[in-house]
Amino acid sequence: MAKQVAVLGGTGAVGSLFIPIALERGHKLTVLARTPGKLKVQHENLTVVQGDATKLEDIQKVVQSDTDILISAVGNTKGNPVMMEEMARHLLEIKPKRAAIISSLGMNGSSPTIRCILSCIGGSEVVNDLDACDMLLCGNPGITVIRPDGLCDKSGHGKYKATLKTGMGMGYLPRADVALFLADVIDESKWDGQGVQLYKCS
């Protein structure tokens, strides 16, 4: 059944792969983008709204009363040390019916080793912000927090391993498979209210 889907981070590495999959499945998407021109897809079921995912009033433009689920593929970069935390607080205020948010393996105690590695690579500010977002959202009814293992840009395998078990994975997970999981979550509520680890499917 076609769903009304609000999308944050639709022009990013994972979000841009998610959008074509969701549209192919017949869903209707409303995407919030700071730079709408970066979105190369055009479709009758795609609406693009200019705005910033750190601003409450902008998120409210795409999350309406008929929105079935919000999908966030937003990721922080150096420059705003509280970007993800701000977005998380806005989502808790808006209270979408359902939401699926990309975090990272290592956040919220899922793998201290990975968290340490990510802090060394990306900087502690970015990791602390992502961790704060994860801790705010995980456990809330209707919200799935997704923690993918190390990501790569290789072609997707069309499958993934999703689990509530924490720990390090083996091998890199294609972003295309994370996008596939996001699309699957639209019609699957089994992960709602939980933090799910996502690994390459062996």
Image (cartoon, rainbow, N blue to C red):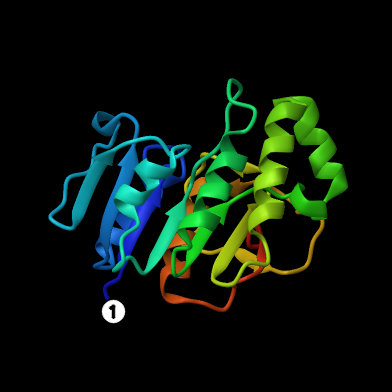
* Image quadrant containing the N terminus: bottom left
Report the residue that reaches farthest toward the top: 79
Q: Residue at x 42, y 59 (%)?
A: 70
Q: Quadrant of residue 9?
A: top left
Measured as percent of width and height from the top left, residue 53 is found at 44, 40
Position above or below: 142 against 76: below
Instruction: From the image, tell me which residue sits under label 1.
Output: 1
Residue 137 at what x, y percent from top left? 63, 57
Task: Give x and y (percent) for residue 157.
Answer: 51, 57
Q: Is residue 89 left or right of residue 73?
A: right
Say what secondary structure mark 1 lies in: loop
Kindly indicate the quadrant of the structure image that contains residue 16.
top left
The local crowd at label 1, few if under 14, some if 14 to 19, many if 20 or more residues have their Cα within 10 Å, is: few
Q: What residue appears at the point 36 percent right and 50 percent down from the top-left corner?
A: 60
* Mark count: 1
Asked whether the viewer can see residue 13, the reply is yes
Q: Is residue 79 above or below residue 6?
A: above
Q: Is residue 39 left or right of residue 75?
A: left
Residue at 80% from the left image edge and 41% from the top image edge: 115
Camera-nearest residue between 69 and 44: 69
User: 137 or 199, which lies in front?
Assistant: 137
Which amino acid lies under the numbered mark 1 shown in the image of this protein? Met
Using the image, determine if residue 9 lies above or below residue 192.
Answer: above
Query: 47 left or right of 141?
Result: left
- Quadrant location of the C terminus in the rendered image: bottom right
